[in-house]
Amino acid sequence: MFVDEDNITELAVQRWATAHSPRLGELMTVLVRHLHAFAREVQLTEDEWMAAVEWLTAAGQACDDKRQELILTSDVLGLSTLVVQLNNRFAPQATPATVLGPFHVDGSPTAPYGFDMSEGIEGTPLFLTGKVTDTEGKPLGGVVLDVWQADADGAYEAQLPEIDEARLRAKYRTRPDGTYCIRTIAPRGYAIPMDGPVGDLMRRTDISHFRPAHVHFLIDEPGYRKLTTHLFQEGSDYLDSDVVFGTKDALIIPFTSRTADTAPDGTTLDTAYLRAEYDFVLQPG
């Protein structure tokens, strides 16, 4: 059969329907239909097709063990948040999930209750406290909270090539009563990396390239649904225009100013600090 504009889509669908995995066959045949429909709707030109190929090539070349430009691409297109929503339909009382982001680093060091994961990095001291429970309110002891964040300049460890050790990231474990205490510094809102293909594309729009101040959490406890989420500082800039669509009302909490006194970890501080409290509720799975 000769290929023409009218039959190319069905021919491609028929070929991909031969996939050995039924799920792969479903994914690829639907993808072909949508890609072809997109090309037809916008009357895609050959120059535009080549520009897209070159852009995707550059995005792939920008990826390394510390940078994931393709995850960033998914984030700014809203795809990451959509996938999170589709796959994390938790009970109303459970902590909502949001995007992982491109800067998570595996293998963070374990840290005791109240450990300062900022380890002297400049910034306003911040204590994050609370507990982890299930949806029935039962405290969960021994749960690991994988925590990471940007520094006071908005930079993550993964963006700093000169850093070869853990920086502003650690794994905390809840006490038997489910409580946790994290010491760090107050995060700041920051711009996503604008020095790569994503930045080049976004500069051609009026889209804000900033994220509001937040701290990342990953909780993967056996018997419960994996939770990837953030805590956002109430009143911070860009809450309504988060470039990766990650903000949720239930994750916005106050960071309360405290004068020099006994800190939540029992130490005495001679400087003012911030305190934020949040109870994580895990969805049984």
Image (tube, helix red, strand yellow):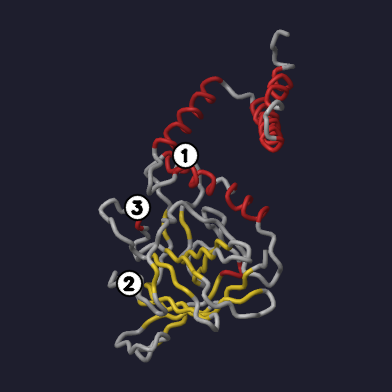
* Vertical relation: 83 (above or below) 253: above
Image location (x, y in percent) of residue 151: 35, 64
In the rendered structure, which disc, 2 or 3, sits on the residue that comes first in sequence?
2
User: Residue placed at 57% from the left, 59% from the top?
Assistant: 98
Question: Tag 3: residue type?
Answer: Gln
| 1 vs 2, front mark | 2
Mark 2 and mark 3: Cα distance apart in space: 18 Å
Mark 1 and mark 2: Cα distance apart in space: 32 Å
Q: Is residue 11 left or right of residue 279?
A: right
Name the image quarter holding the N terminus. Answer: top right
Q: Residue furthest left?
A: 162
Task: Please give the residue where the numbered disc 2 appears in the rendered image.
Answer: 123
Quadrant hosting residue 137: bottom right
* SS at mark 1 in the image: helix
Task: Please give the residue where the numbered disc 1 appears in the rendered image.
Answer: 201
Image location (x, y in percent) of residue 273: 38, 82
Question: Tag 2: residue type?
Answer: Gly
Name the image quarter holding the C terminus. Answer: bottom right
Image location (x, y in percent) of residue 143: 53, 72
Q: Residue furthest bottom?
A: 261
In the rendered structure, which disc, 1 or 2, sits on the residue that comes first in sequence?
2
In the rendered structure, which disc, 1 or 3, sits on the residue that comes first in sequence?
3
Task: Please give the residue where the numbered disc 3 appears in the rendered image.
Answer: 159
Q: Is residue 17 left or right of residue 150?
A: right
The reply to whether the C-beta atoms of the residues labelled 1 and 2 are less than 8 Å apart is: no
* Vertical relation: 11 (above or below) 64: above
Question: Tag 1: residue type?
Answer: Leu
